Amino acid sequence: MSDNVERFVGFICARHRAFLRRAAGKPRPWSSDPILQRCKFCNAYRELDRVTRWIAENWREPHKDDRHLWFALVIARRCINWPATLSKIGYPVPWEPGHFLAVLERRKKKGKQVFNSDAYKLIVSGQRGDLAELQVRLLLDPLWEGRDRFSPRRDDTLATFHSRLAGVKFMGNFHAAQVVADLKYVGRLRHAEDWWSFAASGPGSQRGLNRVLGRPAKAPWAEDEWVEQLHRLQKSFAPALTEAGLPRMHAQDLQNCLCEYDKYERVRLGEGNGRKFVPNPKPLPSAKGEGSQ
């Protein structure tokens, strides 16, 4: 492996070891890496993240046989991404837009956080009005009306379902892939032939792969070329993960790790400060389910 690939693998292993030490109740610091000590990074395996575990335990698993689960996951990932709000909404199938809007309005009036301020919040460029109402009018109502066209089909792969959802206005490539990353663990997509290999790039994972391959961080990618290089990386570093005792990593987790690695490298190289890590006092989720089909 090249030095860049070794550094990337080292980042993945160090991040996962920090998770395991923290989950085991060990005292801080959970990592000897000063950047991992002070900056916030997602887990190496997405299924271990807090929001993902909440969605899995409260919506995904209890409703795994619902053919419209994907719609609930659009709300969870594309619109809200905040468990406290999602718990008040309740599982949103069948769709009741009045209830959705009322819950969000009550939280807003009480001064409580409604949306996660991170990557998945719907931003509607050039549109004026209340964000929740825009979500309902421009995205959620149209999706529900056309729900039978979008539900997973018997012959779907992750890629074909993703393509259908990504083509919806205000969804797009990256956010549709976040829905796929949740939905792939249940129902018809659980045994999709591209379960381990499917991924869609985002800006961070494009920069991350550039860094691993020694390219300029902002060098552009054609999506098919990015996927090809991602698969090469996935294959080349698999033995190193096995040797380190980490589970097999599917391509979507690898995509996520590249995004986090880009954040790490920006801090290491003095290109940014990163987000401050403030430990959540609530217990960590268990380490089950990581990387498994």
Image (tube, rainbow, N blue to C red):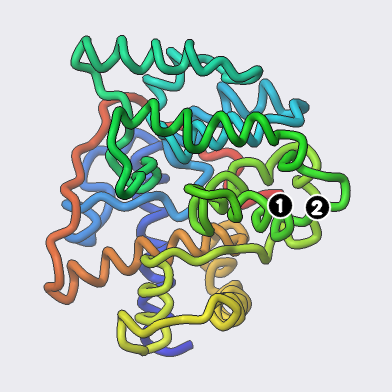
Q: Earlier in the sequence, mark 1 or mark 2?
A: 2
Q: Is residue 111 left or right of residue 13?
A: left
Residue at (35, 17) in percent of width and height: 104
Check the image and report above or below for 87 versus 204: above
> Tag 2: Cα neighbours inside 10 Å, few (<14), some, or many (≥20)?
some
- Splitting the image into 4 quarters, where does residue 131 fall? top left
Distance Cα–Cα, label 1 vs label 2: 6 Å
Kindly identify which residue carries mark 2: 156
Q: Nearer the viewer, residue 184 or 224?
A: 224
Check the image and report above or below for 238 versus 94: below
Residue 180 in view of the camera: yes
As shown in the figure, which amino acid type bears the numbered disc 2?
Asp
Residue at (52, 64) in percent of width and height: 254
How far across and how far down the image is residue 176, in percent?
Answer: 56, 50
Q: Is residue 163 left or right of residue 168?
A: right
Kindly identify which residue carries mark 1: 161
Residue at (42, 68) in percent of width and height: 205
